[in-house]
Image: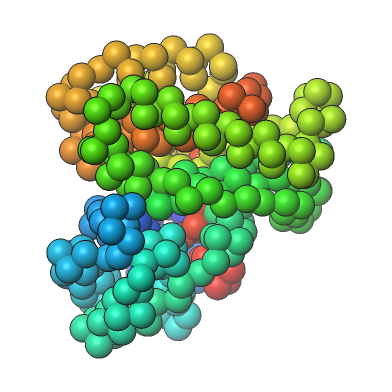
């Protein structure tokens, strides 16, 4: 069912469609899918970087400029959804809208200006939807899995039990108030970027060790009875860099397994790049150049505690989870 997300239908339009919109701290993402007997088939998608959380870490609110960008982007999303016979849709907002002091003003403005009613979901629901979206990339070679999603304003880490013929069950989860946008915003004011990134790495590793203790993960970790999967842009960027792609291609990246040697070598290459080199790299570019190192620091903190081979890469998550739920 999930594999049909990659098949953009070109046959005559069916009658009914569903839509999933994810308004994150960094990016707004929309998927519109036809309802078919094989599951949801994507017919339209839209992604726009809007940096909704550009002042969240420093001022605790959504800036007026970020609101303007969000309104313009969500008007486009509304037009796209109105162009199809969308019978069910879910439009969710995540970390920034959970944390911002002016979130109610923002949500009301979005409703009045675009007609889109945003649902601010909990970190637990965000974690669940991410797992639903990438569940078919997990296998039953182990009984357990660690899944993580490094977002713009928060990072969710899930401890899962796997079962045949059903979705994984979240045994325990944790949400860290760190994401690529909030780390990048704070990083601007730090005298040493490397020192700050290592501070983030150590803080995340400390939280992961506490999570291990709380969820009794260490015994299974010692037995090598756990697999590791990441659904974030950070790990998809690492995969694309490792593959030395001329341009990012989700079909080549999603599902890829990365060994610890590959992970270490790829991260070292990122640290060795200048900001200009990251900006010009075809798999990083202007949208992620400022954000990627914060994501790497968060990932390293997770990977320090869970150096599981391989690291499975998933270029799918919350939006796909919403579509499957709507089905």
Left or right, 254 with respect to 167, comes to left
Q: Nearer the viewer, residue 234 or 1?
A: 234
The residue at 44%/67% (across/down) is: 98
The residue at 69%/42% (across/down) is: 211
- Asked whether residue 204 is in view, the answer is yes
Q: Quadrant of the C terminus?
A: bottom right
Residue 32 placed where, x, y %? 38, 67
Question: Which quarter of the picture shows residue 42?
Answer: bottom left
Residue 244 placed where, x, y %? 33, 19
Above or below — where is 86 with respect to 288? below
Q: Disc count in the image?
A: 0
Q: Quadrant of the N terminus?
A: bottom right
Q: Nearer the viewer, residue 312 or 255?
A: 312
Left or right, 54 with respect to 153, comes to left
Above or below — where is 37 with respect to 248? below
Among all residues in the image, which is located at the extreme front? Answer: 191
- Asked whether residue 17 is in view, the answer is no
Residue 153 placed where, x, y %? 40, 52
The residue at 29%/13% (across/down) is: 272
The residue at 21%/69% (across/down) is: 67
């Amino acid at each position: 069912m999930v594999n049909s997300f990659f098949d953009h239908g070109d046959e005559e339009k069916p009658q009914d469609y569903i839509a999933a919109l994810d308004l994150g701290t960094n990016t707004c993402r929309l998927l519109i899918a036809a309802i078919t007997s094989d599951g949801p088939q994507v017919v339209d998608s839209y992604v726009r970087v809007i940096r909704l959380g550009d002042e969240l870490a420093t001022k605790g609110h959504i800036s007026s400029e970020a609101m303007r960008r969000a309104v313009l982007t969500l008007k486009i999303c509304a037009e796209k959804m109105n162009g199809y016979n969308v019978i069910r849709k879910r439009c969710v907002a995540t970390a920034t809208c959970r944390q911002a002091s002016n979130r109610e003003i923002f949500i009301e403005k979005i409703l009045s200006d675009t007609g889109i009613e945003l649902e601010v979901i909990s970190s637990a629901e965000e974690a669940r939807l991410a797992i639903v979206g990438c569940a078919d990339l997990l296998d039953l070679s182990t009984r357990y899995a660690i899944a993580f999603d490094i977002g713009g304003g928060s990072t969710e880490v899930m401890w899962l039990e796997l079962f045949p013929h059903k979705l994984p069950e979240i045994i325990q989860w944790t949400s860290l108030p760190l994401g690529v946008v909030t780390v990048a915003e704070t990083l601007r004011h730090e005298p040493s970027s490397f020192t700050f990134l290592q501070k983030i790495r150590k803080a995340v590793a400390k939280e992961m060790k506490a999570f291990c203790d709380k969820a009794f993960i260490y015994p299974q970790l010692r037995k090598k009875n756990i697999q590791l999967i990441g659904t974030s842009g950070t790990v998809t960027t690492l995969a694309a860099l490792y593959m030395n792609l001329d341009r990012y291609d989700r079909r080549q990246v999603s599902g890829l397994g990365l060994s610890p040697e590959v992970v270490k070598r790829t991260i070292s290459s990122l640290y060795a790049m200048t900001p200009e080199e990251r900006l010009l790299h075809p798999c990083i570019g202007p949208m992620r150049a400022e954000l990627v190192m914060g994501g790497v620091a968060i990932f390293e903190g997770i990977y320090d505690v869970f150096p599981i081979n391989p690291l499975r890469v998933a270029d799918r998550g919350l939006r796909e989870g919403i579509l499957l739920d709507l089905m």
